[in-house]
Amino acid sequence: MKIIVYKNYNQICDLIAKNIVNKINNKNKSVLGLATGDTFIGVYKRLIYYYNSSKVNFNNVITINLDEYIGELKFENTYKYFMYENFFKHVNIKKKNTYIPENMSNISKSVNNFQQIIKNHIIDIQLLGIGFNGHIGFNEPNNQLHANTHVANLNKSTIKDNSRFFEKGSQIPTKAITMGMADIFNAKEIIVVCNNIKKINIIRKLLENDLIDTKYPVSLLKIHNNVNLYILYELYDKIKDNIYNNVIIL
Ligand code: GLP
């Protein structure tokens, strides 16, 4: 895992977006693995900027999202809506090329459909955020983790963390369909960003040794051979004396 420390969020989003633009321009039918949450909004903004500047064309691009809530929820609270509002509606990507698990009543059909999509594609670049409890996608800390796409029961802490996206009094989902660990690990390159000082304990735990632990799903990324982890300087500064790995400071 390569650890890159950055000082400026906009700059790092631009760097990641440029990397994605290069990939798209050099390869017909690039497959992007996308994430929701606050972390990558800046990257989507830069991709939209490069599209508007005619530096990139999404006509042949395929996207696959990590996860989606399931159960009864307003469309505005779905990850489908998030992706549409923050990215898809601003560029020329084809709707049929954007894959997100479907929140339908036949859940096992939705899981199987999504697993098939994952099997049919190899993701070139996977964007990945880290949950406050160390989850990736919705692979929650546990004694055992799933390799494949599955229905995840969200931890109490995750439900609480994500309640910030929901109106007061509205029902917050407790389940989601998520890529499993093997699905994520199938990506050729994984880009992880931690831009939130409140995730310091997770990053400390991740970088203080070379251990992997299913109770910190993000730590399994140490097994993958092409992971770039970008962490905010303020965060790095507080834990630098306990970091086991080499870091690159931008
Ligand atoms: C949700 C998503 C995760 C994401 C996490 C972090 O839980 N399922 O994939 O990594 O949010 O979100 P944020 O970027 O807002 O910190």
Image (tube, rainbow, N blue to C red):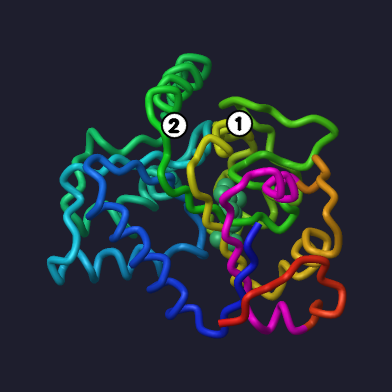
Amino acid at the residue labelled 2: Pro
Residue under label 1: 182
Q: Is residue 86 above or below residue 4?
A: above
At x 50%, y 21%, the residue is 111
The residue depicted at 81 percent of the width and 37 percent of the height is 142
Quarter of the rendering occupied by the C terminus: bottom right
Residue 118 in the image: above or below residue 207: above
Find the magenta span and give its range: 217-237
Name which residue type carries label 1: Ala
Q: Secondary structure at mark 2?
A: loop
Look at 63% across and 75% down and name the residue there: 248
The spot of residue 210 in percent (x, y) is 83, 54
Q: Is residue 124 left or right of residue 208?
A: left
* Residue 51: in magenta span: no
Which sits earlier in the primary sequence, circle 2 or circle 1? 2
Along the line of sight, the residue nearer the viewer: 28 or 59: 28
Front: mark 2 or 1 = 1
Taking the image in four quarters, ligand 1 sits in the one at bottom right
